[in-house]
Image (tube, helix red, strand yellow):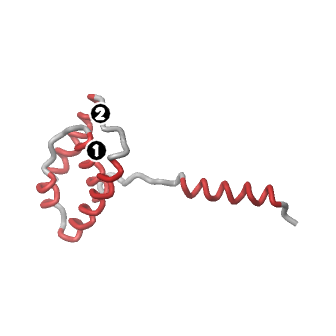
Amino acid sequence: MITAKPLVAVLTLAVLAGCSSVASPLPGTVEYAAATVSRAYDCGLRVDRGGIIARLDRQDRQRFTEANARYAVKSYKAPHRCEMAERERVRGEVDALVRR
């Protein structure tokens, strides 16, 4: 017979494991591009969002727009300050997206 304490502990760990398994988007995906654009805005960088969207395949444009909207909402709660190193990294990633 299982007692209540071990059962509660197992259920709590299962719930916590589910909550902490947030994965960031993989580089090269449309979602990664959307996250990068969102972070660029947070860093105060100019972004040619229309140019990035124009270079995406037609079927990926809607996914990018939806993902970008989700990241924009999350960024309101995120830190908006970027250190110089992060700013330059994000600038390089956005430049690569524009040339894609």
Residue at (80% x, 56% y) in the render: 5
Residue 7 shows in this picture: yes
Relative to residue 95, is residue 51 depicted above or below?
below
Q: Please, which residue is most extreme toward the front here?
A: 76
Q: Which residue is mark 1?
A: 39
State the CA–CA distance, disc 1 to disc 2.
9 Å
Extreme residue in the top direction: 84
SS class of the residue under badge 2? loop
Please determine whether, in this image, residue 38 is positioned above or below residue 43.
below
Q: Which residue is mark 2?
A: 82
Along the line of sight, the residue nearer the viewer: 9 or 23: 9
1 or 2: tag closer to the N-terminus: 1
The reply, left or right, for residue 65 in relation to residue 71 is left
Q: Amino acid at mark 1?
A: Arg
- The percent position of residue 94, horizontal first and vertical second, equals 20, 45
Tell me if label 1 and label 2 are in contact, CB under 8 Å: yes
User: At x 30% / y 60%, what residue is drawn?
Assistant: 67
